Amino acid sequence: MGLRLPIPDKKRRGKMFDIIVLIFILLVAVLFLFPTVVTIANSFMTSNEITANYGAMFSNMTEKQKTFISSNVNLKLIPDKVTFDQYKAVLIQNSDYLIKFWNSVILTVPITVFQMLVAILTSYGFSRYPNKFKGIIFFAYIILMIMPYQVTLVPNFLVADKFGMLETRKAIILPAIFSPFSIFLLTKVMRRIPISYVEAAKLDGAGEFKILTKIYVPLCKGAIASIAMLVFIDYWNMVEQPLVLMKESTYHPLSVFLSQINTGDIGLAFAVGTVYMIPTILMFLYGEDYLVEGITYSGGIKG
């Protein structure tokens, strides 16, 4: 009999590959979550402890001295003494932070709600009604979507100035409502809904509004929720628009105000940063299933 070479165990190799992938995912997760963990942990430290750990980085020193000290920063994740003084200052003693927080809410919630309403109606039109100009209009949406926001910021400024909307929230909210991003994504999803569903609904006497609300919206609820989450997070973190369109700091959201916190109040910055993250974290925890469903939905319906 001839000599047989050992055949590699495919199952074992597959298991090793899964372990390597898992380790890689864990490393990436730690890399992305570490700043968040540091922010939350340091927000419960006393001012003296924070100053002892990081204060030298922001003191009046030369760049060479700061570089040397920064390399020896005492990065801690467990406070010596847990305190809520920073949160007391943010939520009770200084009303500016809460005002900026609610400014963020007042800007972001209407943008998200009305942008999704416009996206649902527009996407339904793109997916349902044949028109020789539909392809051109949709292509224009794609061009607008891939443009950096900074390209359209100046035209938006000129239009807002022309209509007397500068220094008001309308200068930010109105252009954002008609963003092409959500329309593009939702149109792609709605086009995958089988036409047989619509024909069956019409046989039962359903009109366009009923078809939209009883067929398209329920079938696309995962995609709608996931897109709404992305829109909310995007505008919750906006900085350029308020700085350009609303120079009066009274209406600035917390995202702008965060960069203006005095570096002498490092502990305060950690607490404000933690409060700032709460809405997006809660939204993700609540809508995680919808987000996953929305991401995988495009392949879920077959005509």
Image (spheres, grey):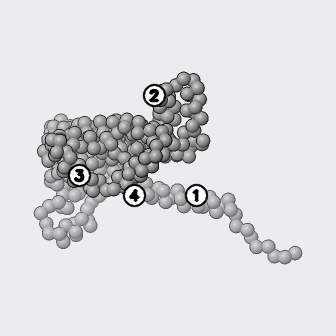
1 vs 3, front mark = 3
Q: Is 108 placed above or below 199 here? A: below
- Give the quarter of the figure containing the C terminus: top right
- Give the quarter of the figure containing the N terminus: bottom right
Q: The disc labelled 1 sits on which kind of residue?
A: Asp
Q: Residue furthest top?
A: 205
Circle 2: element type: helix
Res 51 quadrant in image: bottom left
Residue for badge 1: 18
Q: The disc labelled 2 sits on which kind of residue?
A: Phe
What residue do we see at 15% from left, 41% from top? 164
Q: Percent x, y for residue 176?
A: 29, 43
**Mark 4 closeness class: few <14, some 14–19, many ≥20 residues within 10 Å:** few
Residue for badge 2: 209
Of the pair 51 and 133, the residue shown nearer to us: 133
**Mark 2 closeness class: few <14, some 14–19, many ≥20 residues within 10 Å:** few
* Number of the label disc, if any, that sits on residue 31: 4
**First in residue order: circle 1 vs circle 3:** 1
* Number of the label disc, if any, that sits on residue 155: 3
Circle 1: element type: helix
1 vs 2, front mark = 2
Q: Is 111 placed above or below 20 here? A: above
**First in residue order: circle 2 vs circle 3:** 3
